[in-house]
Amino acid sequence: MTGYRTRGAAGYLEVSKSFLDKAAAAGKGPAYRKAGRVRIYDQPDLDAYKRSTRVEPKSEQAANEKVDTT
């Protein structure tokens, strides 16, 4: 299992280190574990976070919604 420190996790997620710092302080963002004062993010948790924050384009959302003709 691959573990990333905050800066590496930010690079993997294509966000800033500051974003992850703020998300962790707010209790949001990807799951992590502590090793002393260091946050360690496991790759499966980062992948799950990426999937959970995915936004589909409007055209795909409309195609996936049922059309009510009544």
Image (cartoon, grey):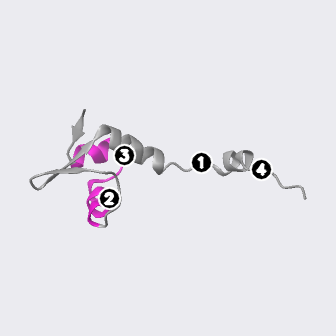
Residue type at the position of mark 4: Lys
Q: Which residue is mark 1?
A: 56
Q: Using the image, determine if residue 42 lies above or below residue 1.
A: below
In magenta segment, residue 9: yes
Separation of disc 1 and disc 2 at Cα?
22 Å
Quarter containing the C terminus: bottom right
Looking at this rendering, what residue extends furthest in the bottom direction? 26
Q: Which residue is mark 2?
A: 19
Secondary element type, mark 4: loop
- Mark 1: few/some/many CA within 10 Å (<14, 14-19, 20+): few
Separation of disc 1 and disc 4 at Cα?
16 Å
Separation of disc 3 and disc 2 at Cα?
10 Å
Secondary element type, mark 3: loop
Closer to viewer: mark 4 or mark 3: 4
Quarter containing the N terminus: top left
Residue type at the position of mark 2: Phe
Looking at this rendering, what residue extends furthest in the right direction? 70
Left or right placement of residue 45 versus residue 64 in this view: left
Counting residues from the start of the chain, the first of labels 3 and 2 encountered is 3
Separation of disc 2 and disc 4 at Cα?
36 Å
Closer to viewer: mark 1 or mark 4: 4
Residue type at the position of mark 3: Glu
Q: Which stretch is magenta? A: 6-25
Q: Residue at x 31, y 53 (%)?
A: 16
Number of numbered discs overlaid on the protein picture: 4
Q: Which residue is mark 3?
A: 14
Could you tell me residue 9's position as x and y percent? 28, 45
Q: Which residue is mark 4?
A: 66
Counting residues from the start of the chain, the first of labels 1 and 4 encountered is 1
Q: Are marks 1 and 3 in contact (CB under 8 Å)?
A: no
- Mark 2: few/some/many CA within 10 Å (<14, 14-19, 20+): few
